Amino acid sequence: MDEIVVIDYGSQYTQLLARRVRELGVFSKVVGPDYTFTGKESGIILSGGPESVYEKRYDLPQFSGIPVLGICYGMHLLAERFGGHVAKGAHGEYGLTKVKFFPSPLFDGIPSESVTWMSHGDVVEVLPPNFKMTAISETGITAAFESENDKIYAIQFHPEVVHTSYGREIIKNFVFGICKERPEWTMNNFIDSEISRIKSVVKDQKIISAISGGVDSTVATLLTYRAVGDNLIPVFVDHGLLRKMDINVPQTLATLGIKVKYVNASELFFEKLKGVSDPEEKRKIIGNTFIEVFEREAKASGATFLLQGTIYPDVIESAASSQRSAKIKSHHNVGGLPEKMNLKVLEPLRTLFKDEVREVGRLMGLPDAFISRHPFPGPGLGVRVIGEITKEKVGILRDADDIFVNVLMRAGEYSKIWQAFAVLLPVRSVGVKGDARSYEYVLALRAVDSVDGMTASWHQIPFEILRMASSEITSKIPQIGRVVYDITDKPPSTIEWE
């Protein structure tokens, strides 16, 4: 089977490119700039990146007639490679930008003008010889150029993000119209190939599975169980930072024939987190303590591998996928791992996004009620209690979060939201309860819409539902005196507060 190769130059959106191609039914993978071609490539995509070509320029591979699409930084590499010139622009273009398109195989079937998503400060000042401009932005900057005879195409904007109006069509034109691919790859292909890969890597060794309570770790466990059977040892660690709904995960897996060992390590986690308020330090402590517990369990069982439900947004934000990406925050199962540990890490979902993980779960028989559960971070409520973590604060937040989620479910709103949760703030506010002055915690509610977790917009919960949630929370939880609603998109914020 042929494949579209995405060469990573450090863009936050690199994996989205491969993912968009896979959505079209064509296999795609992300590789580094030093990639050696195998002969199976039907097309090459050069990603964007945070650097400028006049400061750091990567060597481009020999394309040998393979169609190439350069995006943003990838566009600038192509411009310089073939004799053009790139320089810092008089002004950058960031966010939604109108673009005018000219005839090109890349833009077949899309309007002559539409909105794209830009993120650049450099511009192509001089086109390479024998190349023509095929799009221009509303500010007069070259938005695309090409050499159709050489099958080389370059665009300044990002077609892989949902904000570009006809991004899918542009990628589709490249994959099918220019690369002449056929839609023959599915998530079933991923399941089959990953099961084979796990078998070849693990062989007859034992694997300990880190069940956190979320969809990712559960799907990773089920997928690996299909590969190695009883050589998988699933362990559910209760770190004291779980939601109320997470406790039933062992029962869910038991219905699929997987026995899970329950370990209550909450006292250990709370002791290690005592007095810690920095979010990065909290994440790393939780990650290290997870490994400490799992290494102890692994030693007792003879396991040599640690299975984790790491998915691609975790990798991107922890900057673990590429030395060229910018670090946003450590995830306990990526940036929070200690430098030295006695277990080899197995991450079968590392290249997938949340909705792809859910599709894998559905195909393997996980109940829809479980699949539709909102994402939950590995560090759990530890990154939703802002500041120092205590048992009391976690208990308050757990009850408030459960009320919020149940209000959304009763109102039929939960299924419309990508992720909704509560955050306990290290702030107290004056109020009135029972004709007396109160001075209690402030709780923030957060709900966002997203496709893949890379970008998100705040969800507009109807006011009557918010009022219902606020009233029920402040009535049932005496330690909370005020409820606020977070209306910030990603970017500039992240989905989680810490």
Image: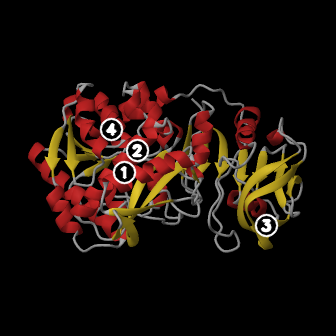
CA gap, disc 3 and disc 4: 45 Å
Of 442 and 82, the residue lying toward us:
442
Against 323, residue 260 (above or below) is above
Task: Please rate how many residues cluster around mark 3, counting C-alpha atoms within 10 Å: few if below 14, some from 14 to 19, many from 20.
Answer: many
- Labelled disc at residue 123: 3
CA gap, disc 4 and disc 1: 21 Å
CA gap, disc 3 and disc 2: 47 Å
The residue that mark 1 highlights is 401
CA gap, disc 4 and disc 2: 21 Å
CA gap, disc 2 and disc 1: 6 Å
Q: Are marks 2 and 1 in contact (CB under 8 Å)?
A: yes
Task: Please rate how many residues cluster around mark 2, counting C-alpha atoms within 10 Å: few if below 14, some from 14 to 19, many from 20.
Answer: some
Amino acid carrying label 2: it is Val
Amino acid carrying label 1: it is Asp
Q: Are marks 3 and 2 in contact (CB under 8 Å)?
A: no
The residue that mark 2 highlights is 405
Q: Which residue occupies 71% across, 46% down?
A: 68
